Image (cartoon, grey):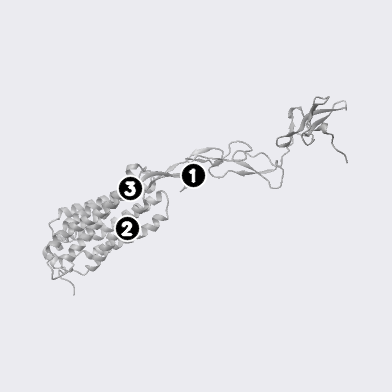
Amino acid sequence: MFRLHPYVKKVVFNTSGGDLIHFDERGSVAAHFSVLNFIILPNKTMKKLQVGHFAEGPDGLQFLRTNTAIHWDPRFTQMPSSVCTPSCLPGYRKVPQEGQQRCCYNCVPCAEGEISNQTDMENCMKCPDDHWSNEIRVACIPRPVVFLSYGDGLAVCIFVFSLIFCFLAAVVLVIFITHKDTAIVKANNRNLSFILLLSLVFSFLCPLLFIGRPTKMSCLLRQVTFGNIFTLAVSSILAKTVTVLLAFNTINPNTNNSPLRKYSSTSFLFIGTSGQSGICVFWLVFSPPFPEYNTQVEVGKVILQCNEGSVAAFYTVIGYMGTLSMISFVVAFLARNLPDAFNEAQYITFSMLVFCSVWVSFIPAYLSTKGKYMVAVEVFSILASSAGLLSCIFIPKCYIILIRPELNTKTGVMARKCFPKN
């Protein structure tokens, strides 16, 4: 048992060889070891050459070497590696092996959206929000911006069908205007028929607002235009159905309904459209739609879409329209057994059944899709419901006007069961 003499604590001195030696406060000497390379010369003598050394550093014992000074045996074609694994290439990061030395690690590919552009990087770098990593994870590239463009095959189909149905609705409108004084057109308020056909013409054009690059103006106009035009169409149908009921005194046979008949169509039309317009004004003032870039929907892509602003306002518009549709369906169903000559309630009942079915199925389909396919679902619902109204209400009348004109007279109309069924 011995004690270290105090004179060796915190002492620094140079040896005769020029090496610096120092003792710390505990009397410990910093480790320092020379690395020697023994060389066998052609004359069979041995020579030793210092090619490196171990020295105590801030991170512990470190090995410092001079590769150019080392003489390797001719059997070595390259310098031997002192690591467990080869270097990690760009696109990978080093992950230390648990329980192994620091030189032992695995090379793990960078995750999507991250890159490494140097060898043996310990961490990958995250790409900016508007960029994404390329396939080999060595560079960030701009994300492609996706929206329902006019060059998209789906958009082309929507565009073509919209124009075809719009043309058909316009043709039916021209037919009704040309034959406005005939019995079949005058029945059930021809002015409401003109308003309904005109609203259908514009409803078939609504999908065009959903195609193309979303802008601030297009996002503002999309849902508001669609909601008001469809509300006008459904309000026209409701007014036509109520007119049928009033015409045959089915509400109260003992009451004079002449003033009510005179103003009912206008009042129903005004009340129905003004309610929807009020909702849309409130929507645009307090939480209007706006274009946004969404990077969360599809991997590696930026979805340019219209944010509805207020989801509650959007579904209120749809709900208001659906409520009017259900009322129209119920009223038309009650009036389905009135005289066939003046009664289109049967056609309206079926058309509103189709209309309501489309929009009831729209909500789950809309919620289950993302990106441009959400737009496609809504556009399909617009086209399908509008086509249902056009075909169910007006095609039978066009058949009589164009194919069976002999039935389109007062006499022909009276011959088609002009009296209520028993």
Name the kind of residue labelled 3 in the image: Phe
**Secondary structure state at the residue bearing disc 2:** helix
Q: Which residue is mark 3?
A: 286
Viewer-nearest residue: 214 or 180: 214
Q: Which residue is mark 2?
A: 319
Q: Reading the chain from its start, which is encountered first: label 3 or label 2?
A: 3
Viewer-nearest residue: 330 or 157: 330
Q: CA distance from mark 3 to mark 2?
A: 19 Å
**Secondary structure state at the residue bearing disc 1:** loop
Q: Residue furthest front?
A: 6
Viewer-nearest residue: 76 or 336: 336
Q: Is residue 17 above or below residue 90?
A: above
Residue 45 lies, in percent from the top left, at 88, 27
Residue 234 lies, in percent from the top left, at 25, 57
Residue 172 lies, in percent from the top left, at 21, 54
Name the kind of residue labelled 1 in the image: Gly
Asked whether the beta carbons under mark 3 and mark 1 sit within 8 Å of each other, the answer is no
Q: The C terminus is located in which quarter?
A: bottom left
Look at 29% across and 56% down and name the residue there.
387
Disc number for residue 300: 1
Viewer-nearest residue: 315 or 19: 19
Look at 60% across and 36% down and name the residue there.
118
Look at discs 3 and 2 and give the one toward the viewer.
Answer: 3
